[in-house]
Image: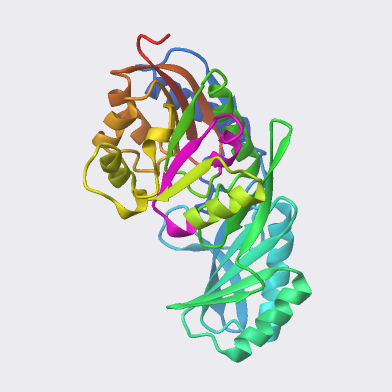
Amino acid sequence: MDCKHFGECGACIVYENGYLGQLNAKLELNMERFSHFYDGKIEVFESPDQNYRSRSEFKLWHDGDEIRYAMNNATKDGVVFVQECPQVNEYISELMPKLLKYIKEAEIGFKLFGIDFLSSSSGEIVISMLYHRRLDDEWEVKAKEIAQSLDIYIIGRSRKQKVIIGQDYITETLHINDKKYKFNHIENSFTQPNARVNESMVTWAMKQYSSASGDLLELYCGAGNFTIPFSFIFDKILATEISKSSINAAKANMKLNDVENIEFVRMAVEEFVDALDGGREYRRMKEIDINRYDIKSIFVDPPRSGMDIDSCLFVSRYEHIVYISCNPETLQRDLAILSKTHTVMEMALFDQFPYTHHVEMGVKLLKKGSL
C-alpha cells in the first residue's frame, strides 16, 4: 500500500518491509507465543494490501470555512489531516472528497465532529454524521438532498438523537464455499471490517467442523456472521449474544438466508452458562428446550477481553471447540485453561488489520482421549 501519511498517521504503524514484511513479523511473533500449545504449521490468510476496509471512522477538523478529515497521529498527541486513505475500499475512497464538498455547500458542517463510513462490497453505503448540536428540520431537508445526490444513506447523530435518512444498514454479500450469504450490517453495530479476510475466517471455521456431528452451541454470536453459514453444517444451533441490536440483526439475517434451524438468545455468556448449569431461572431461556439439543461442538468468538475462567471451564466440557480470537494475548491466557482438557489440532492467522500489530487467530481443539 502506498500512503503519503505512513509514519505520521496512527491508523497504520507497521510499514517497514512492505505488506509481506509486516505479515511475516506477525506470524513469527504468534508462532513463538503459542509454541507451548502447538508445534504445527499456522495457516496464514492474507489481506488485500489496500482498499480492504469496509468500515472506517474519521474525525472532522474545522479551520475557518474549511473542513478536513483527520486521524490521530502516530504519537497520539495530535492529529494528521488526510485527503485520502488507501485502507478504505474504493467506494468509500471515492465518496470521501465528494461528501465534504456537499456538506460545505449545504452549510451543515456546524459542530460536525466526525463521520463514520459503512460500505458493502457492491458499493452500498451508509454514513453517520456526528454532531455536538441538536439536528433540526432544516438539517434533515439538506441531508436528504445530499443522500439523493450521492446515492447513499445518512444517519445524523447527536446526544440522544438519531435521524435516519433512508435506512440505517447496508446489505453485504459474502462468498463462502461457492455459496452466497447475505447479511444486514447495521450502522453503529459491530461488523467485520475486512470482508475478504472475513470470508476466509468463516470458510476456515466451517472446515474445522467437517467431521463434526449433532448440534452446535455458539457463544458471542454477534449478528450471525458465523452462525448463518454453520447452519448448513449442523442439525440445530443454539447461539447467544448480549447485544440487542446484534440479536435483532441475526434474526433478520436468518430470514435473508432462508435459515430456520437456529435459536438466538439475548444473554450474557456468564448468565447463559449459569442457566444451562441449572442456576436461577432466566426469562429469556423460558422458551428454550435444551434437552432437544445434542451438543458436541462449540464455537466462540469473544471480544478482546477473551473469556473468563468459568466460561473457559464450561467450554472445555465439549468435545470439539473452535475459537476465533481478535486478541492473541487473551487467547494465550484462555488456552492455558483449555489445553488441560483439549489438544490444539489446528491454528490459523487472519490478517484482518494490515499494517498494525492486530491480528485474528483461529484455533481448533479436540478433547483429549477422543482422537
Task: Please state if 203 lies on the left or on the right of 282 as rendered.
Answer: right
Identify the image quadrant of residue 167: bottom right
Q: Nearer the viewer, residue 245 or 8?
A: 245
The picture places residue 205, in percent across and down from the top left corner, at 54, 29
Q: Residue at x 67, y 72 (%)?
A: 166
Residue at image coords 25%, 34%: 309
Residue 227 painted magenta = yes
Question: Which residue occupies the foreground of this view, 204 or 239?
Answer: 239
Q: Which residue is at 72% across, 64% downward?
A: 95
- For the point 51% across and 22% down, the residue is 213
Left or right of 283? Residue 197 is: right
Q: Nearer the viewer, residue 110 or 148?
A: 148
Q: Which residues are magenta?
A: 225-246
| 354 up-or-down from 161: above or below | above
Residue 314 image offset from top left, x and y in percent: 29, 31
Question: What's the colour scheme?
Answer: rainbow
Q: Where's the C terminus, which quadrant?
A: top left
The image shows a total of numbered marks equal to 0
Residue 59 against residue 18 in the figure, above or below: below
Could you tell me residue 107's position as x and y percent?
Answer: 64, 86
Whether residue 107 is visible here, answered yes or no, is: no
Q: Quadrant of the N terminus?
A: top right
Q: Is residue 169 visible?
A: yes
Which percent across, then down, holds residue 249? 54, 55
Q: Quadrant of residue 283?
A: bottom left
